[in-house]
Amino acid sequence: MNIRKNKDIPLFLLLIPVFKLIDSLITFSEVVYNINFFIAFFIDIFQGYVTWVVVRYIIKKMEKKEPTFHFSKLNFAKQLLFTFLGAFITVLIVPDGHQMISGTRYIDSNHKHFIHDLITFFIWILLTNFIYLMLQYHDIWKKSEEKLQFEKVLKAEGLTIKIGDKNIKILLNDIYGFYVENGFTFLINSNFKTFIVESSLDNLGQKLPDRYFFRVNRKFILHRNSIISFKRIEDNKLMITTLFEKPLPIELSISRLKAPAFKKWFELDTAL
C-alpha cells in the first residue's frame, strides 16, 4: 500500500471527523448543541487521530514484514488483531469527550453502553483495515498496469540507452540483465556489452516484466535467457549458473528467502 506516498492521510483526516459525528448521532438522542458538545466533538476527533496514527504505524510495520502480495486471511486476521489491541490501549489512555455531551443515550444500561461502544469501536477498526487493504490492492493494480505499459513499449521499441550524443534502442530479447557497480546502473546485452542506464535498479525492478526478469539480490536483475541452471546449496540457498564470464560472475547465490520465488519463476514456461 502506498502508505509510502502518504495517500491515506487526506482520506483519514476527512473520514475521522465524519465517523466521530456519526458515532455521536447513533449514541445520543436529543443532543444539546452547545459549547460543551463542540469541545467534546473536538476531543473525540483528537482521540480518533491519535488512535489512527497508532493503527497506521502497526499496519506499516506489518506490511514491511508481510508484503501485500503475500496476503492471506491469516495475515489479515493478525493485522486486525494487532490493530484492535493497539487502538484499544490507545483509547484507554487518550480520553473521549462523551461525558461532556448533554443528551440522552439511546441505551440506558451501563453494561449495554460498553457493548455499544465496543461494537462501534470494532466497526471502526474493521473499516480502517478494509480501507488500507483496498488502498494496497489499488496500488498493486496501478503498478501492474504501469508494468504492462512498460512491457509493451519494451517489446515494441526496446530500452533507450544514451551513449554520448546518441540514443540507441536495445530490444527486450537482447537484454541479459542489469547490475550496479560504483553507484552506476549498467545494462548487459546478449553480446555481453555493457551500457550505463539512467535509472536505479529499484526503479527498473518495479517496471520490468516479472515474466522475464528476476531481482536476484540488491546488485543484480537477470533475464531468464541469461540463466542456465540452478542448484541447492547450504541453508536452503540456491546457486544459479549464468551465461556470463565477465563483467558478471558465472555463479550467483540466491538467499533462502528468495529461493522459493526464484524456483517458481524459473520453472515458468515463458516464450518471448
Image (cartoon, rainbow, N blue to C red):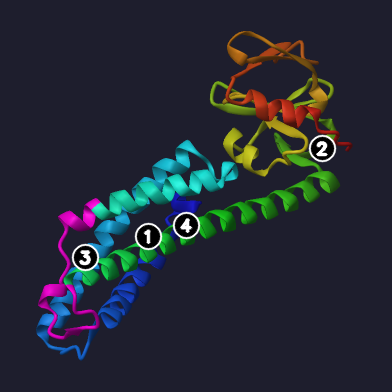
Check contact, mark 1 vs mark 2: CB within 8 A: no
Q: Amino acid at mark 4?
A: Tyr
- Tell me the number on the disc at residue 125: 1
Q: Nearer the viewer, mark 1 or mark 2?
A: 1
Q: Nearer the viewer, mark 3 or mark 1?
A: 1
Relative horizontal placement of residue 142, taking residue 94 as reference (left or right): right
Pointer 3 or 2: first along the chain:
3
Q: Is residue 261 magenta?
A: no
Pointer 2 or 4: first along the chain:
4
Residue under pointer 2? 172
The quadrant in which the C terminus is found is top right
Pointer 1 or 2: first along the chain:
1
Q: Secondary structure at mark 3?
A: helix
Relative horizontal placement of residue 77, taking residue 49 as reference (left or right): right
Residue under pointer 3? 46
Given residues 34 and 168, the one toward you in this image is 34
Q: Residue at x 63, y 56 (%)?
A: 142
Relative horizontal placement of residue 166, taking residue 204 as reference (left or right): right
Q: Amino acid at mark 3?
A: Phe
Q: Secondary structure at mark 2?
A: helix
> Height in image: 11 above or below 102?
above
Q: Is residue 266 visible?
A: yes
Q: Secondary structure at mark 1?
A: helix
Residue extent of the magenta highlight: 89-109
Q: Is residue 221 visible?
A: no
Residue under pointer 4? 132
Label 1 crowding class (10 Å Cα cut-off): few <14, some 14-19, many 20+?
A: many
